[in-house]
Amino acid sequence: MKNGKAPTREQKKIMKAHGLIPENWLVVKNLPETLEVVSRTALKKVGQKPRTKIVSKSL
């Protein structure tokens, strides 16, 4: 898995529109149509698979 990055302002707006709290998520992929994010809390837990979500940029 690639390292997640902190979301930009534009990405935070997209996450909020989809009901996610941007402070709890890291951006893994930023594609033209979608945004793939990983939960920060799931990354801290040892031995668990990180929780990922794919968010559509269009509403």
Image: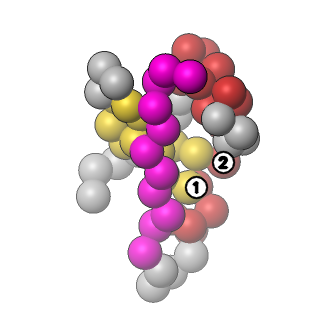
Residue 33, percent across and down? 34, 24
The secondary element bearing badge 1 is classed as helix
Residue 16, percent across and down? 70, 30
User: Decide: marks 1, 2 in contact (CB < 8 A)?
Assistant: yes
Asked if 17 appears above or below 43 in the picture, the reply is: above
Q: CA distance from mark 1 to mark 2?
A: 5 Å
Name the residue rendered at 68%, 27% in the picture: 17
Residue assigned mark 1: 40
Task: Pick the quarter of the image with the C terminus.
Answer: top right
Asked if the magenta segment contains residue 58, the reply would be: yes
Q: Residues within 10 Å of mark 2 (few under 14, many from 20)?
A: few
Pick the residue in front: 58 or 42.
58
Task: Pick the quarter of the image with the N terminus.
Answer: bottom left
Asked if 55 appears above or below 42 in the picture, the reply is: above
Q: Over which residues does the magenta segment extend? A: 49-59
Asked if the magenta segment contains residue 18, the reply would be: no
Q: Is residue 8 visible?
A: no
Amino acid type of the residue that numbered disc 2 sits on in the rendered structure: Asn
Q: Is residue 17 visible?
A: yes
Q: Pick out the residue farthest to the bottom.
A: 47
Name the residue rendered at 30%, 27% in the picture: 31
Residue 18, percent across and down? 64, 35
Pick the residue in front: 58 or 16.
58
Amino acid type of the residue that numbered disc 1 sits on in the rendered structure: Arg
Q: Residues within 10 Å of mark 1 (few under 14, many from 20)?
A: some
Name the residue rendered at 56%, 76% in the picture: 45
Could you say which disc has been placed on residue 24 in the image? 2
Pick the residue in front: 36 or 8.
36
The secondary element bearing badge 2 is classed as helix
Asked if 56 appears above or below 37 in the picture, the reply is: above
Q: Earlier in the sequence, mark 1 or mark 2?
A: 2
